[in-house]
Amino acid sequence: NAGVMQNPRHLVRRRGQEARLRCSPMKGHSHVYWYRQLPEEGLKFMVYLQKENIIDESGMPKERFSAEFPKEGPSILRIQQVVRGDSAAYFCASSTGTGDYEQYFGPGTRLTVT
Amino acid sequence: GIQVEQSPPDLILQEGANSTLRCNFSDSVNNLQWFHQNPWGQLINLFYIPSGTKQNGRLSATTVATERYSLLYISSSQTTDSGVYFCAVERRAGGTSYGKLTFGQGTILTVHP
């Protein structure tokens, strides 16, 4: 029973490039959440999505960041024109969206901006 | 928003020792989860425990929702228990699930052989 899958596991981008992070939820899960872990700030919520809908994006930076969860395929977190401050671990989690809403996390994508 | 405080921030143990980690939160919650972040950075689910007591092997957890705290007990610690332990809570305002976990700063546990 595969867990939450994220790819790539490590991503290196130069300043100004775009970063695309992918997340496939656990089988049977239709709710996806993205979190960011910065060294001095801990784990912070970014966005909560269901298929084709953004439910809560209160943690997303206002510029350069976007997320989607299309009807088919993985959820994508997109960062345009990356800056050094975007270097962090980005985690995706998923839940069934019913019952207890327990969230299960993927292994994360470590983004390094040079 | 809701505040989550974990204590102690750091804990060093000898293998075989027992420990208690605490999580205090500032408001009523609908969801509380404990995670272990291992040295490779992966977040492992330990407990989903908005209230009550649960046990899983050497680990157990208790949440007293009315007093706004949760405890994680580790017995007979092993070197593989090393890592960071996070408490995370979700508060749903107005009866709607927002799915937003708020994490504490974590407890860094080091277990020496």
Image (cartoon, rainbow, N blue to C red):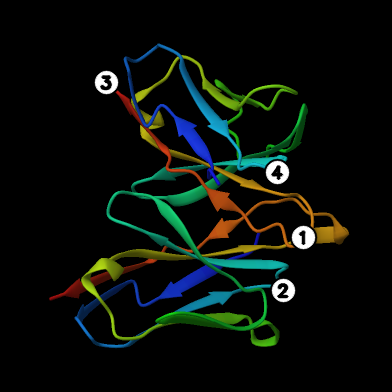
Instruction: Tell me the subunit letter for badge 1.
Output: B
Quick one: B74 or A37, which is closer to the camera? B74
Q: From this viewpoint, which residue is outermost toward the left? A: B113
Residue A109 is situated, as x and y percent measured from the top left of the image, at: 41, 34
Q: CA distance from mark 1 to mark 4?
A: 23 Å
Q: Residue under label 4, please give it.
A: A28
**Is residue B21 among what the camera can see?**
no
Q: Which quadrant of the figure has residue B58?
A: bottom left
- B100 in relation to A21, above or below: below
Q: Secondary structure at mark 4?
A: loop
Q: CA distance from mark 2 to mark 3?
A: 42 Å
Q: Secondary structure at mark 1?
A: loop
Task: Specify which label sits upstream in the sequence, 4 or 3.
Answer: 4
Q: Residue under label 3, please give it.
A: A114
Q: What amino acid is found at the position of numbered circle 2 in the picture?
A: Ser
Q: CA distance from mark 1 to mark 2?
A: 9 Å
Q: Are marks 3 and 1 on the same chain?
A: no
Residue A38 is situated, as x and y percent measured from the top left of the image, at: 39, 44
Q: Residue at x 49, y 71 (%)?
A: B5
Task: State the mark number for residue B28.
Answer: 2
Residue B89 is situated, as x and y percent measured from the top left of the image, at: 61, 64
Determine crowd level at label 1: few under 14, some 14-19, many 20+ residues with C-alpha closer than 10 A: some
Q: Which circle, 2 or 4, is nearer the viewer?
A: 4
